[in-house]
């Protein structure tokens, strides 16, 4: 068994430590809602593109994760007996659950498979292609986010909290008075409790600090 | 040499034809009001629809129990009022025109990755919230941890449809309504779509007003997952527009310590 395991590792490049590229990135990076959605939507697009360019109308399977999230009665649960797989067929994509016993024993995360005579066949070239594409996607969205947010953060400016989005905050530059507010991800944990809608923050020495709690009063004075 | 003056007289016949055409057009618009397009959001046409006198599926306030500590109550055994005809995988968003009292009405969308806000989408102008019906903001520093009574409350949350600055997607809501009532249900739908980016959820939020009150007594939230007809996501709840410890005059939005 260990010989088979080593063979698979050596010949298929499969390891036990692999994590899903996109889901891990989403879990480990602080992103705006728009960035998260762009990555999730982008993954779908890239899997479709890979299927189209590498396999034309042939079925293609991309293994996303070792467990399948599913929902029942408004609650998310996980099926640990199957892989979460994106299946592409005739240009249509859907998420399916593939029982683990049908794919090679070693982790298949981030790998592409096709089917031959009912059996899953590992596609190394397509796998590497798609892995590179997904890494590029996640990094480019994150870079774009950081550039955008960097341009919004102005030393000494006051910002009104206009909406709370989890640990992120939507801020409107009270000093600069631009047209739009924006979603900020770098709100220090120690002020999250007081950085509520209507609060005013100040960007000082490279970070946000609580300034005052009279944001709505300031808005009224501005009208 | 003087310029010859032209006196082109419009004949009575031509005038009558013009008047008749205008009248026909006006009658046509009255009986068949077209949805006014606000433009596009994420390539999905965002439509205003003329607000109905009463939304057929809106909960009757008389049947809703008095608020008692829980931020929401289930309606119709938590089953929304969508019918088979409602199910679709076409993305859409619909918002109601303000009524003659300046109140927002039902907001209805097919939530999917197509309508959710993505990279590069601007949040739009935050606008002057004083336009919202019932907006009588007040501070209660000793009663409300976050000081202010009211939030700008989106009917369909930004994270679901990216409509931040659309006044028809906003009501005056207490912080309690926004964070304790509505937000958990919004999060359920958002997380479901992120887990299933090729799926859809019909999602309808109806502010419920008593009579001519400017402040909604609450909002009804309905949602159902389309592809599996509600096996994954299915709820029909009424969230109370209240703030514990504060008395609210719903006719105006004024408030007092309780």
Image (tube, rainbow, N blue to C red):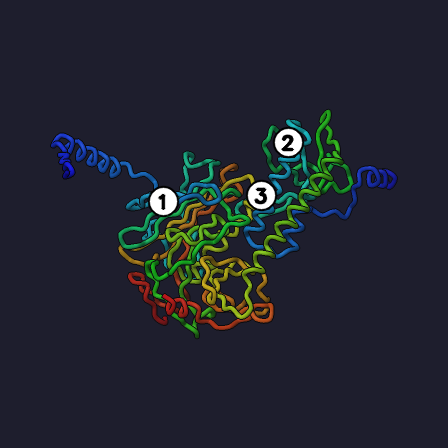
Question: Residue A181, image x and y in percent?
Answer: 48, 59
Instruction: List the residue tagged with mark 3.
Output: A41
Q: Is mark 2 on a helix, strand or loop?
A: helix
Farthest-out residue, top: A117
Disc 3 with disc 2 on a shared chain: yes
- Which chain letter matches label 3? A
The one nearer the camera, A140 or A72, is: A140
* Residue B66 in the figure: left or right of residue A97: left
The Cα atoms of the two marked residues, 3 and 2, are separated by 17 Å
Name the residue located 47 percent from the left edge and 41 percent from the top edge: B43
Instruction: List the residue tagged with mark 1.
Output: B48
Rendered image quadrant of residue A190:
bottom right
The Cα atoms of the two marked residues, 1 and 3, are separated by 27 Å
The one nearer the camera, A117 or B10, is: B10
Question: Residue A106, image x and y in percent?
Answer: 78, 41
Q: Is mark 3 on a helix, strand or loop?
A: helix
- Which chain letter matches label 1? B
The Cα atoms of the two marked residues, 2 and 1, are separated by 38 Å
Q: Is residue A47 above or below residue B73?
A: above
Instruction: List the residue tagged with mark 2.
Output: A52
């Amino acid at each position: 068994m260990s010989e088979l395991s080593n063979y698979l590792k050596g010949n298929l490049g499969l390891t036990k430590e692999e994590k899903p590229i996109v889901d891990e990135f989403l879990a480990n990076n602080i992103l705006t809602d728009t960035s998260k959605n762009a990555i999730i939507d982008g993954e779908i697009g890239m899997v479709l593109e890979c299927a189209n360019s590498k396999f034309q109308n042939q079925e293609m399977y991309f293994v996303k994760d070792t467990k399948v999230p599913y929902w029942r009665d408004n609650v998310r649960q996980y099926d640990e007996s199957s892989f979460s797989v994106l299946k592409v067929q005739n240009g249509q994509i859907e998420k399916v659950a593939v029982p683990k016993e049908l794919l090679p024993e070693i982790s298949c995360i981030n790998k592409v498979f096709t089917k031959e005579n009912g059996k899953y066949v590992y596609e190394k070239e397509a796998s590497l292609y798609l892995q590179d594409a997904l890494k590029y996607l996640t990094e480019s969205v994150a870079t774009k986010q950081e550039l955008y947010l960097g341009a919004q953060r102005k030393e000494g400016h006051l910002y009104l909290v206009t909406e709370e989005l989890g640990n992120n905050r939507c801020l409107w530059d009270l000093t600069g008075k631009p047209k739009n507010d924006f979603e900020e991800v770098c709100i220090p944990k120690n002020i999250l409790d007081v950085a509520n809608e209507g609060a005013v923050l100040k960007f000082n020495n490279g970070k946000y600090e609580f300034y005052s709690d009279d944001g709505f009063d300031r808005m009224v004075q501005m009208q | 040499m003087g310029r010859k003056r032209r006196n082109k007289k419009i004949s009575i016949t031509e005038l009558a034809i013009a008047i008749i055409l205008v009248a026909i057009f006006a009658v046509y618009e009255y009986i068949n009001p077209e949805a006014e397009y606000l433009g596009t959001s994420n390539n999905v046409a965002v439509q205003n629809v003329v607000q109905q006198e009463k939304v057929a599926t809106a909960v009757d306030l008389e049947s809703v129990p008095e608020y008692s500590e829980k931020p929401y109550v289930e309606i119709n055994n938590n089953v929304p009022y969508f019918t088979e005809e409602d199910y679709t995988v076409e993305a859409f968003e619909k918002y109601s025109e303000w009524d003659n009292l300046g109140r927002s009405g039902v907001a209805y969308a097919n939530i999917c990755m197509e309508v959710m806000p993505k990279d590069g989408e601007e949040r739009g102008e935050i606008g002057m919230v004083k336009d919202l019906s019932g907006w009588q903001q007040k501070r209660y520093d000793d009663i409300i941890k976050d000081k202010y009574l009211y939030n700008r409350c989106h009917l369909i949350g930004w994270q679901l449809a990216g409509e931040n600055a659309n006044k028809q997607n906003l009501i005056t809501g207490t912080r309690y309504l926004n964070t304790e009532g509505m937000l958990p249900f919004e999060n359920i739908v958002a997380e479901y779509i992120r887990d299933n980016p090729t799926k859809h959820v019909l999602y309808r939020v109806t502010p419920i007003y008593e009579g001519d009150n400017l402040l909604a007594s609450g909002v009804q939230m309905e949602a159902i997952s389309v592809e599996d007809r509600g096996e994954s996501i299915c709820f029909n709840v009424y969230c109370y527009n209240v703030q514990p410890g504060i008395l609210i005059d719903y006719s105006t939005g004024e408030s007092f310590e309780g």
